[in-house]
Image (tube, coloured by chain):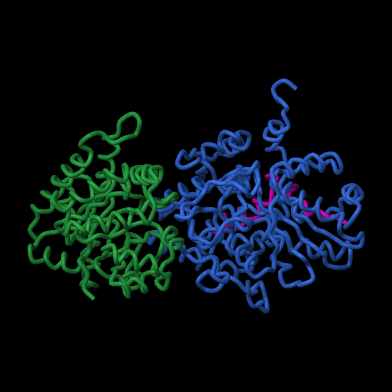
Chain colours: A blue, B green
């Protein structure tokens, strides 16, 4: 296989049409096209507006609690006996994950555009909770589309969203998971074009969403760069993050893409293994296609029908991936690897016991990869991992997987 | 180039009435009955035929067409089988234009060039690909012209005067005016508003304009048809198939006949209209 020509910079994308290499773009129904173009215009003007940036910065600091700490995981480092391990602790954010970074940026954009109603899709409910949170704070009505299967397995987050005043619409089409929720959100948007802002939760969808979500999440990588310079006086040797749609990962990776000595690893949900179709490793086992407004790697059959996929982690349960990750894979800038459900579960328990941190199942995939790699690296090496969510929401799932009955124990 | 679509709209213009464009989902309720439904459409009064290419994630479709696609996929429908259906239909000698409608991914995976070649050979005259806006014309719209296939674009209530030229630029065959903002099978459109919108489009182009989304009855078809060159009916037809399934989800005897009966009724609607 011929190696594609390496670009001078990995940070220049997307182009004007929203492409990262051959990926990305704007594959939407004509009804939505004017809305997408309007959003692009609004985002370009917001980017050039110092007040917009100042407002985000203020909210990041006083509402979310940024900067999130960069924490040296000393016990885990000792336990694994290799590279020094740091966690970027976005699980300490308000709402318990990195999702709030994106939601604050987009709600300010919605306000600027004069929209009066928010819709969102959610899988695990982390984005739904963050969207409902910002909608509550800024006084918008909010409708969250959530697959029926996910509504059942993520009941704590469903209750939280209701407390925050959001209306939850369970989606029964398809298998009732994230992709079906996204289809239904798009159907709402195409119907309510005048007043509605679609607050997408990950760095995917039609241009300009992948770009703007990445930009709002890049606060993770920018802070991390400063913090690691302060702590170690140099950049890390390796970054590791889990990828579902890929927003936490692109947020950490993007500011480092042109630092060629920093090795970057994205970790996909390997589910029950890549042999069958019970996984969500679109970059490792999928092929390029077009879904939800962008060209990207997708899990699909020979007829181009999209598969449902599986992961123990509802937040990684998506058969696609943000288009910029597809580009970073094809240019070999980032290495993408799968981690199985069982490995993620082991990593979950390890972190609880060594560091006293209960992580979400999503970053446990990244952690399991760190567990594999750190012992093989010298003690002078540094790994930074994005600990992008906390695990409270997952205790029932983990309990079930470990055979613990929560009702009686 | 001149396609069967062009020829048909010329004939309709000479007759002075709007055409009836019927939508069915390929392979719904199964391959056999689906073929029977398709083959009988011209005799029932369909002037043009749209065949849906089933897709797992039909983002612009309402429940009726979503379910139709799911039934077809469950029965093993593929893009190759859909093309084979068209080829069989053509063997009957019909000159009724066939337009394939759906989403881009199955075509992209089939391979754009080979798809266009196979579609042309099967007797396909036009394509409506919901998620390929003019911004992506290089991918399929422009190559389709080289294969004598019309690329029919959708215009919607959100397509304003500034955007309309972009939508019209590479459209051929006809323009499909989506009468409402929303998904297929939603509320009925207001004929007055639609008439004005279509008149505004016709002031900018000589291409025929067909109107769809929300048309269910002969009366609505006539109302909408007064101001348009064609009226598209989809969800109402696939709903007939749903209504004719037994408890096991298999089609009852006479399912195709029931679809054709509604087509006949709708055809009487468009045939009652005399364009001035």
Classify residue B50 by image quadrant: bottom left
Q: Does A94 lie within the magenta span?
A: yes
The residue drawn where x is 36% and y is 45% is B72
Above or below for B20 versus A41: above
The residue drawn where x is 71% and y is 49% is A339
Work out which quarter of the rendered image holds the N terminus of chain B and state it. Answer: bottom left
Residue A132 visible: no
The residue drawn where x is 32% and y is 59% is B157
Q: Does B93 lie within the magenta span?
A: no
Is residue A300 or residue B261 the one in the foreground?
A300
Farthest top residue?
Answer: A408
Decide whether the magenta segment is chiefly helix, strand or loop.
Answer: helix
In the rendered image, residue A166, in percent from the top left (x then y), is placed at 54, 40
Magenta stretch, residue numbers: A84-109
Is residue B5 or residue A168 the one in the foreground?
B5
Residue A332 is left or right of residue B142, and the answer is: right
Residue B212 is left or right of residue A369, and the answer is: left
Residue A241 is left or right of residue B275, and the answer is: right
Above or below for A194 versus A329: above
Is residue A220 or residue B19 the one in the foreground?
B19
In the rendered image, residue A172, in percent from the top left (x then y), is placed at 46, 38
The residue drawn where x is 60% and y is 44% is A278
């Amino acid at each position: 296989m011929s190696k594609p020509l390496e670009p001078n910079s990995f940070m220049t994308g997307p182009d004007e049409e929203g492409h990262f290499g051959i990926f990305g773009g704007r594959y939407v129904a004509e009804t939505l096209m004017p809305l997408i173009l309007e959003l692009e215009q609004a985002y370009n003007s917001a980017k050039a507006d110092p007040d917009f940036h100042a407002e985000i910065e203020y909210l990041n600091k006083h509402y979310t609690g940024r900067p999130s700490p960069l924490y040296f995981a000393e016990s885990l480092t000792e336990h694994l006996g290799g590279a020094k391990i740091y966690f970027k602790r976005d699980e300490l954010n308000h709402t318990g994950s990195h999702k709030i970074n994106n939601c604050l940026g987009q709600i300010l954009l919605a306000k600027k555009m004069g929209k009066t109603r928010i819709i969102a899709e959610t899988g695990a409910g982390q984005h739904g909770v963050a969207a409902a949170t910002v909608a509550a704070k800024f006084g918008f009505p909010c409708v969250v589309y959530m697959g029926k299967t996910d509504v059942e397995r993520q009941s704590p987050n469903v209750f939280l969203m209701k407390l925050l005043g959001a209306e939850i619409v369970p989606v029964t089409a398809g298998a009732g998971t994230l992709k079906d929720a996204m289809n239904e959100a798009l159907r709402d948007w195409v119907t309510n074009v005048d007043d509605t802002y679609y607050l997408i939760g990950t760095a995917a969808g039609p241009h300009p969403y992948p770009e703007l979500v990445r930009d709002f999440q890049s606060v993770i990588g920018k802070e991390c760069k400063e913090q690691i310079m302060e702590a170690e006086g140099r950049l890390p040797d390796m970054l590791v993050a889990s990828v579902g749609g890929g927003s936490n990962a692109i947020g950490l990776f993007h500011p480092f893409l042109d630092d060629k000595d920093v090795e970057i690893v994205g970790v996909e949900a390997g589910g029950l293994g890549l042999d069958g179709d019970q996984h969500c490793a679109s970059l490792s086992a999928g092929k390029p296609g077009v879904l939800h407004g962008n060209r990207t790697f997708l899990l699909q059959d020979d007829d181009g029908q999209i598969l449902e996929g599986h992961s123990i982690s509802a937040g990684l349960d998506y058969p696609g991936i943000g288009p910029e990750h597809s580009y970073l894979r094809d240019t070999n800038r980032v290495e993408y690897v799968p981690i199985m459900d069982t490995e993620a579960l082991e990593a979950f328990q390890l972190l609880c016991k060594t560091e006293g941190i209960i992580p979400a199942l999503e970053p446990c995939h990244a952690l399991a990869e760190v567990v594999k790699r750190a012992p093989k690296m010298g003690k002078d090496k540094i790994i930074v991992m994005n600990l992008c969510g906390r695990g409270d929401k997952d205790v029932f799932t983990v309990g079930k997987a470990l055979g613990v009955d929560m009702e009686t124990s | 180039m001149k396609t069967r679509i062009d020829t048909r709209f010329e004939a309709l213009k000479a007759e002075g009435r709007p055409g009836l464009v019927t939508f069915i989902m390929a392979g719904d309720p199964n391959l056999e009955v689906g073929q029977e439904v398709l083959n009988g459409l011209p005799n029932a009064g369909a002037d043009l035929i749209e065949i849906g290419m089933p897709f797992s994630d039909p983002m612009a479709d309402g429940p009726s067409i979503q379910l139709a696609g799911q039934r077809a996929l469950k029965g093993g429908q593929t893009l190759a089988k859909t093309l084979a259906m068209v080829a069989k239909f053509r063997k009957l000698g019909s000159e009724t234009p066939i337009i394939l409608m759906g989403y881009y991914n199955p075509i992209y995976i089939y391979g754009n060039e080979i798809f266009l070649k196979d579609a042309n050979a099967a007797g396909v005259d036009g394509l409506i690909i919901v998620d390929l806006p003019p911004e992506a014309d290089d991918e399929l719209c422009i190559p389709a012209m080289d294969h004598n296939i019309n690329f029919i674009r959708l215009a919607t209530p959100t397509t304003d005067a500034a955007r309309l030229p972009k939508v019209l630029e590479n459209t051929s065959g006809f323009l499909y005016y989506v009468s409402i903002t929303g998904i297929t099978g939603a509320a009925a459109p207001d004929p007055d508003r639609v008439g004005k919108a279509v008149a505004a489009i016709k002031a900018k182009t000589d291409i025929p304009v067909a109107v769809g989304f929300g048309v269910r009855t002969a009366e609505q078809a006539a109302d909408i048809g007064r101001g348009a060159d064609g009226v598209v009916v989809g969800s109402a037809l696939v709903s007939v198939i749903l209504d004719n399934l037994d408890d096991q989800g298999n089609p009852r005897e006479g399912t195709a006949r029931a679809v054709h009966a509604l087509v006949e009724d709708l055809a009487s609607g468009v045939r009652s209209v005399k364009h001035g």
